[in-house]
Image (cartoon, rainbow, N blue to C red):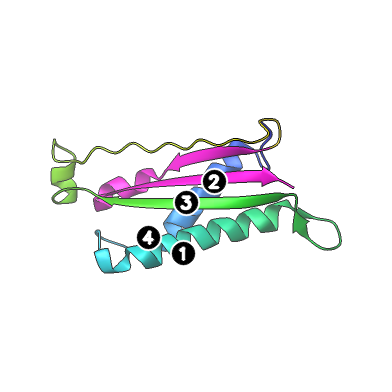
Amino acid sequence: MASPLPTEELAQIAKSACETALGSVQKYEHASVTEWNTQIINTILQSLIEKTSTGEDKVPGYKYITNSTIIQHIGSPSESQASGRRGMHSAVGAYWNNEKDGTYSYKWEGAEKIGMDIVISITWIAL
C-alpha cells in the first residue's frame, strides 16, 4: 500500500492535531467533544492537503477521509488506570486499489492522563 506520506509523518500530524485541540484540557467535557473532534479533523485534513499538494494548481493526488473518536473513561483519570476503563475496538474495511489507497490508525497517548482515549484514522484514495 502506497502512503501519501511516511507513517512517521502521519503519526506526527495526528499527534500535533490532538495536542493543538486538547493541549490545555484537564478532563473530559461532553459539551466540548464536537469542537475537539472538529478541530482535530480539520487540522489533520489541512496538514495532509498542504503537505501533499503539487503542481501549479496545488491539488493533492489523494482524497482524504479522517475520523476522530473520543471516548470518556469511566471515573476520574486516576480511577481509569485501574479496572474502570471501558473497552473499545475500532476497525475499518474497504474495497479499493491496495497499491494506491490505504488507511492509517493512531491512538494519542496524551489522552490517558485526562481520562480519555482518542483514536484517529486517516484514509486516502488515489485520484
Picture quarter containing residue 3?
top right
Front: mark 4 or 2: 2
Looking at marks 4 and 3 on the same chain, the residue that comes earlier in the sequence is marked by: 4
Residue type, numbered disc 3: Asn
The residue carrying mark 1 is 39
Q: CA distance from mark 2 to mark 1?
A: 15 Å
Vertical relation: 74 (above or below) 21:
above
In the image: residue 116, left or right of residue 109: left
Residues at marks 2 and 1 touching, judged by CB atoms closer than 8 Å: no
**Extent of the magenta region:** 101-127
Looking at marks 2 and 3 on the same chain, the residue that comes earlier in the sequence is marked by: 3
The residue carrying mark 4 is 22
Residue type, numbered disc 2: Ile
Binning the other alpha carbons within 10 Å of mark 2 as few (below 14), some (14 to 19) or many (20 upward) gives many
Q: Secondary structure at mark 4?
A: helix
Residue at 61 percent of width and 37 percent of height: 102
Looking at marks 4 and 1 on the same chain, the residue that comes earlier in the sequence is marked by: 4
Q: CA distance from mark 4 to mark 3?
A: 16 Å
Q: CA distance from mark 2 to mark 3?
A: 7 Å
Q: Secondary structure at mark 3?
A: strand
Q: Position of residue 62 (x, y in %)?
A: 70, 49
Residue at 61 percent of width and 61 percent of height: 46
